[in-house]
Amino acid sequence: MSTATKPKHIGRNISRIRELKGMKQEALAQAIGSNQQAISIIESNESIDKVKLEQIAKALGVTVEAIENFSEESVFNFFNNFYDNSASNGQGASGPIFTFNPLDKMVELYERLVLAEKELVLAEKAKVEYLEKLLNK
């Protein structure tokens, strides 16, 4: 087995990043003022002009280095670590981690509902008074 590293295929990296972002070739082409066929050619090339690479990186919302050093393994590691850390909040917890007191939120909601009900009752009273005035005239 050879230990030589194969060169990065910049076009393939652009294609994968574009796909991960849910962007079509046409959208990328429009963002850089080109056409879909040109993007197809760029994505099939192993290397790309530095200026064009900077335009593409900007359109994809990533850095040139991110395109040059892209690997699917690093993406999967990032998302796995992100999911693991966000799910357990780094503490190995099995349930949700609240950054607020749920009971306080329930009380706040109840108070808002009571206030809305009071406002509704006052509005109904005002309506009844108005209708009574109309009837008395």
Image (cartoon, helix red, strand yellow):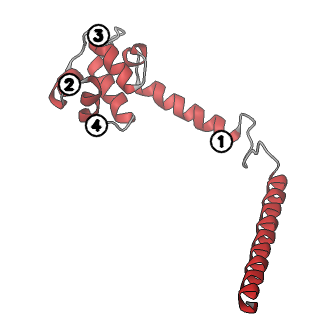
Quarter location, residue 50: top left
Sequence-earlier tag: 4 or 3: 4
> Label 2 crowding class (10 Å Cα cut-off): few <14, some 14-19, many 20+?
few
Secondary structure at badge 2 equals loop
The amino acid sitting under disc 1 is: Ala
| x 41%, y 23%: residue | 71
Using the numbered discs, state the Cα–Cα distance from disc 2 to disc 4 in whole angstroms. 13 Å
Sequence-earlier tag: 2 or 4: 4
Q: Nearer the viewer, mark 2 or mark 4?
A: 2
From the top left corner, tell me how far across and down residue 83 is, in percent: 59, 38
Sequence-earlier tag: 1 or 4: 4
Secondary structure at badge 4 equals loop
Residue 87's label in the rendered image is 1
Relative to 65, is 99 above or below? below
Q: How many labels does the image show?
A: 4
Q: Name the residue under label 3.
A: 51
Please indicate whether residue 103 sits to the left or right of residue 87 in the image. Answer: right
| x 37%, y 28%: residue | 17
Using the numbered discs, state the Cα–Cα distance from disc 4 to disc 3 in whole angstroms. 21 Å
Using the numbered discs, state the Cα–Cα distance from disc 3 to disc 1 in whole angstroms. 40 Å
Sequence-earlier tag: 1 or 2: 2
Please indicate whether residue 35 sits to the left or right of residue 9 in the image. Answer: left
> Label 3 crowding class (10 Å Cα cut-off): few <14, some 14-19, many 20+?
few
Residue 24's label in the rendered image is 4
- Kindly check if marks 1 and 4 are in contact, taking CB atoms under 8 A apart as contact: no
The amino acid sitting under disc 2 is: Ser
Relative to 42, is 84 above or below? below
From the top left corner, tell me how far across and down residue 72 is, in percent: 41, 27
Sequence-earlier tag: 3 or 1: 3
Using the numbered discs, state the Cα–Cα distance from disc 1 to disc 2 in whole angstroms. 41 Å
Quarter that holds the C terminus: bottom right
Please indicate whether residue 63 sits to the left or right of residue 80 in the image. Answer: left
